[in-house]
Amino acid sequence: MLCCRLAALGARRRLRPLGPAAVLQCHHLRYPSRSLMSSGVPGKAGSNLLFYLIVGGTVTGAGAYVYKTLRENKERFTSRVTTITARSQENASSPSGAASRGSAAPEAHPEVPSHVPFLLIGGGTAAFAAARSIRARDPGARVLIVSEDPALPYMRPPLSKELWFSDDPNVTETLRFKQWNGKERSIYFQPPSFYVPARDLPFVENGGVAVLCGKKVVHMDVRGNMVKLSDGTQISYDKCLIATGGSPRNLPAIERAGKDVQQRLTLFRKVEDFKSLEKISRQVKSITVIGGGFLGSELACALGRRARTRGLEVIQLFPENGNMGKVLPEYLSNWTTEKVRREGVNVMPNAVVKSVSVSGNRLMIKLKDGRKVETDHIVAAVGLEPNVELAKSAGLEVDSDFGGFRVNAELQARSNIWVAGDAACFYDIKLGRRRVEHHDHAVVSGRLAGENMTGAAKPYWHQSMFWSDLGPDVGYEAIGLVDSTLPTVGVFAKATAKDTPKSATEQSGTGIRSESETEAEASEVPTSPSASPMPHVPKQGEDYGKGVVFYLRDKVVVGIVLWNIFNRMPIARKIIKDGEEHADLNEVAKLFNIHED
């Protein structure tokens, strides 16, 4: 309305000097006939025609001016709105602008947050357990996992166990498997929908867990609470967990062999290694597994099963006298070796690799005793080296005896830095300083670190367990110090159909056995009925169906192996925690009900 009034006023001012003469100068207008003439307004000069012309011209001019003004105003308004919107988007895309608003469009957020309250370095079991623990205690927590692995967090045990026994031809794609109890599950802890996109982590209302896959932290500034990624990106944090795990060791003889040998070598650790080895096992005629420990023996048995149906030759060689010779007493190690041979594996104990070379189209492995082994592919399963590269830039202490970052009882390396999993060298209040490389330890230490990162201040007292399955029929669980150089006492009994890993998972409902009993401990050690038969110490050549092996140090039990005995780990944990000297371990063996039918 204001624009209209101003327009009309302007029009009147411009028309005020014009008189009749100005109008009559328009030569294309002719004088109207007299019938149309009027004497005009009384007392005024001019005619009615002239009055109408002036009024009409005024209205027309005013309308044109108003239209032009409104059009220009609309264009200026549209331009102004566009400018303001563009500036808002620019401000929202910057870290300061996004932080102050928290409601910018998702596509405007940077790919990597510049700051996170909880930073977890490493994407394995320990890191995931810590993230879950942090969120349980602080539901609004924002947790960022930085992982070198291109895959989301997953469990490693099935990579050398159940996945190899799957009947699914697409198992390398689905990564789903049937547990010994027949239930199916994925190796991934959670589906992708569980995680928050990293770019959205600072802005989501209730926090969440984000994972940066395929990224590596190469530098830590402990004083500045800052890390740098391999691509130069920097992330600041309030609290940090180092769960970098370890890398598989190689043999010096293989490292010296050159690229031709390296191209036919698998250092088994990640899901990509499983996919690669599974494919190779379908293409070659011979695979040699070097290593007689947990991983080497499991892979040998898994590949041996395939040898029967596909004509694949599987060879396992190691320097010890028998499979798992560093863990099991000699008689049980020898029995295990025969078990692996029955699975179709050519087991070669007391074998030390001297050199590896390419001969024709095959690999030639020369042993120190002069023996030679021809094969197409090598799998090295000779241990793990903790990843401690960050120690130098962070100024963190690495244990000279066991490796790994030295931490206190609360798994702290600094006031706001914790370490969990394979990379943590911790103090065990019962067994001294240790470093453990098993799934259960990763779960429990990661969970405790997460609790302490949210203020729990709890010490690590847990005795972690580990297990190994040589297929669905033979398996064992162990706890504490299980070292074959220690004195041992074994008590065995005849096994039944229920004494297998398959039956154990059917009873517990989980294939990852530590998930169901990871921190359980018997409140008191039960007393066995006196009518139970007396267990016996085994003799060479016996079939060790099921039993208990006690490892002693200064006459005190410091380690226990439960051979084909399952769901009894709380009792074993209690025995070690009590740290008492036992006069008769045969009586202690009765506590595990090994004579139950």
Image (cartoon, helix red, strand yellow):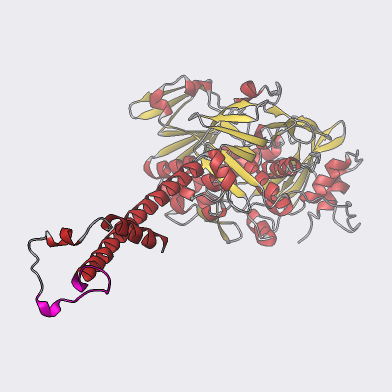
- Front one among 149 and 450: 450
Q: Which residues are magenta?
A: 33-49
The quadrant where residue 242 appears: top right
Q: Residue 34: within the magenta?
A: yes
**Point 36% across, 54% down: residue:** 73
Q: Is residue 15 visible?
A: yes
Left or right: 540 as drawn, with respect to 371: right
Left or right: 255 as drawn, with respect to 32: right
**Point 13% across, 62% down: residue:** 24
- Residue 564: x and y in percent read 70, 51
- Residue 231, relative to residue 542: is it above or below? above
- Front one among 579 and 199: 199
**Point 71% across, 43% down: residue:** 450
The quadrant where residue 431 appears: top right
Main SS, magenta region, reads loop
Quadrant location of the N terminus in the rendered image: bottom left
- Front one among 209 and 482: 209
- Residue 534: x and y in percent read 85, 51
